[in-house]
Image (cartoon, rainbow, N blue to C red):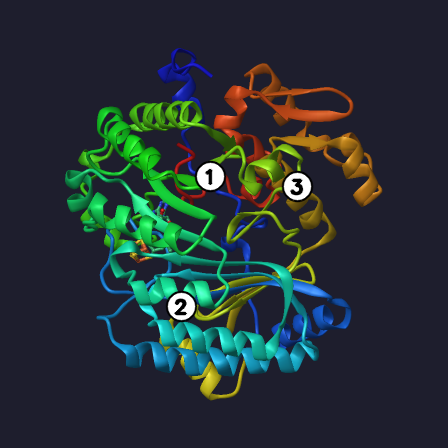
């Protein structure tokens, strides 16, 4: 895809609010969900489950990065805060297991945040003991943690090694000081270099770095330097996220002056430059916004069509069922989304009452499940195999998606996809705008045109 093909007209056509499809139906469609609803979901899941993925959310951060779109609670570093939170996580795990009524096999465990390494090394150890008390470990389990380099100590690295973590992800975003100052996250290159050396010397082999394009004061020239610095650090994987600017949902983002943000064409230019440089630097492009060394398992999974997507991002394990534990966390079990209370006080209060701290959720209809599969295929593989749809759901793709044929024809006419009787494939242009292709299958979006809940697709 050459930048020259991306005329202002093309960019303008596709720049609109749209979901990132870490879930379908997307979170705004979920309804109030009671502890009893969730207990039923867990019962149904427990009746047939063998294994699952577990996500635990640690919401605390010591300061607020002004671009942040995650669910965070700002607290000064304080071990007591972590201790209390762990007490509540333990209560939730006990309630959940009471409803599942068995000890399933964990094939994937992910601690995310906020900042999971806000917890001290001994607290991480306690967390692992709690998890091991409620689940059995698949010997091949992926055990992942998101880290903020600014809070990472040697003690953390030693503990992560001893506790069996085999996937480390760290937030970088941008190395340029002006950008870092503008987003209230100053994190020098040397700090990250030291952390990388500490991780490599302890034998960690799967290290990811998160970057964001579209931040204030970013330009192609400035971000090119960041990319070169990242290449010098040689992480195994890189996530290159589009800045989700959603000040109507995240009020602290109002601290960012919109005038300092690159406009859509510039933002896309930054992405394309970064993409080219990463490809030239020995990385493979993986689905929408990830890159991995060609020798890395994620690249292999992508090329062999066995990459999956859920709230934890892209994953190598079939992520059909996952349990979310902790404030605001999301799970998907027995074709049902469930999200915990987003407010720490409310989360604690529910657990004090002995109730599952769930707030919202959705039991997927048959139609939801079909669309969920199609959208996930587009987001992970840039293609939809119509024969596989028939095999899975027992319905002909063209017949079922009759109302979507106009959208598909338009996507073909605009060069976003090609299609024949067996398969839909995104073109190079369509890969850049895969969210726009997927949006045509989103039944809920069609009912509410112009939804302002989502970030821009560029
Ligand atoms: C929970 S954070 C990572 C761990 C740790 N809190 C840190 O920042 O280092 C997950 C990642 O989400 C991404 N992120 C956060 N807010 C975002 C936004 N508004 N748009 C796009 N990506 C965002 C960042 O790349 C961040 O590293
Ligand atoms: S980007 Fe990470 S450290 Fe910054 S506020 Fe968000 S979760 Fe916390």
Of labels 1 and 2, earlier in sequence is: 1
Q: Is residue 107 above or below residue 349?
A: above
**Badge 2 residue CB within 8 Å of ligand 1:** no
* Residue for badge 2: 159
For marks 1 and 3, the one nearer the N-term is 1
Residue at (36%, 57%) from the top-left corner? 147
Nearer to me, 212 or 247: 212
Mark 3 falls on what kind of element?
Answer: loop
Q: How many marks?
A: 3
| Vertical order, 186 against 428 (above or below) | below
Picture layout, residue 135 above or below residue 378: below
Foreground residue among 62 and 365: 62
Q: Residue at x 33, y 23 (%)?
A: 269
Estimate how packed mark 3 is, as few (under 14), some (14 to 19) or many (20 or more) residues with alpha carbons within 10 Å.
some
Which residue is label 3 attached to? 306
Quarter of the image where the C terminus is located: top left
Which residue does the numbered mark 1 point to in the structure image? 18
* Picture coordinates of residue 49, whole percent (x, y): 73, 67
Q: Is residue 343 left or right of residue 255?
A: right
Q: Position of residue 263 (x, y in %)?
A: 28, 28
Do residues under tags 1 and 3 come within 8 Å of each other at their CB atoms? Answer: no
- Give the residue at x 33% y 49%: 196
SS of the residue under disc 2: helix
Between disc 1 and disc 3, the foreground one is 3
| Left or right side of 79 for 396 | right
Query: Any atom of ligand 1 within 8 Å of the CB at mark 3?
Result: no
């Amino acid at each position: 895809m050459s930048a020259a093909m991306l005329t202002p007209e093309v960019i303008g056509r596709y720049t609109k609010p749209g979901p990132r499809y870490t879930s379908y139906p997307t979170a705004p469609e979920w309804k109030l969900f009671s502890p009893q609803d969730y207990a039923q979901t867990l019962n149904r899941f427990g009746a047939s489950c063998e294994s699952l993925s577990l996500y635990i959310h640690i919401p605390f951060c010591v300061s607020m990065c002004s671009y942040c779109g995650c669910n965070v609670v700002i607290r000064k570093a304080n071990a007591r805060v972590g201790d209390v939170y762990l007490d509540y996580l333990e209560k939730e795990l006990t309630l959940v297991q009471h409803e599942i009524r068995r000890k399933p096999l964990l094939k994937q465990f992910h601690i995310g945040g906020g900042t999971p390494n806000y917890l001290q090394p001994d607290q991480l150890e306690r967390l692992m003991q709690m998890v091991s008390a409620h689940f059995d470990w698949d010997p091949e389990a992926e055990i992942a943690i998101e880290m903020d380099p600014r809070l990472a100590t040697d003690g953390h690295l030693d503990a992560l090694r001893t506790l069996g973590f085999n996937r480390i992800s760290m937030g970088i975003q941008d190395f340029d000081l002006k950008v870092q100052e503008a987003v209230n996250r100053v994190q020098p290159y040397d700090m990250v270099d030291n952390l990388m050396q500490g991780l490599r010397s302890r034998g960690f082999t799967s290290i990811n770095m998160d970057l964001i394009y579209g931040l204030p004061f970013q330009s192609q020239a400035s971000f090119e330097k960041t990319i070169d610095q990242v290449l010098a650090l040689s992480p195994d994987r890189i996530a290159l996220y589009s800045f989700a600017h959603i000040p109507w949902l995240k009020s602290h983002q109002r601290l960012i002056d919109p005038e300092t943000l690159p406009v859509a064409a510039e933002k896309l230019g930054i992405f394309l430059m970064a993409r080219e440089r990463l490809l030239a630097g020995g990385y493979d492009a993986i689905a929408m916004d990830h890159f991995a060394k060609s020798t890395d398992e994620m690249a292999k999974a992508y090329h062999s069509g066995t990459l999956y997507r859920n709230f934890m991002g892209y994953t190598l394990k079939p992520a059909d069922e996952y349990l979310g534990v902790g404030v605001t966390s999301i799970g998907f079990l027995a074709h049902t989304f469930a999200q915990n209370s987003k407010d720490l006080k409310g989360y604690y209060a529910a657990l004090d009452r002995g109730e599952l701290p769930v707030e919202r959720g959705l039991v997927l209809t048959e139609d939801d499940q079909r669309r969920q599969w199609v959208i996930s295929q587009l987001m992970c593989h840039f293609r939809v195999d119509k024969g596989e749809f028939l095999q899975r759901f027992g319905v002909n793709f063209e017949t079922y998606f009759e109302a979507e044929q106009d959208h598909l024809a338009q996507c073909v006419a605009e060069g976003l996809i090609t299609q024949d009787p067996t398969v839909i494939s995104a073109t190079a242009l369509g890969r850049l705008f895969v969210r726009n292709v997927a949006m045509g299958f989103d039944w809920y979006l069609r009912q509410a045109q112009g939804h302002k809940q989502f970030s821009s697709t560029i």
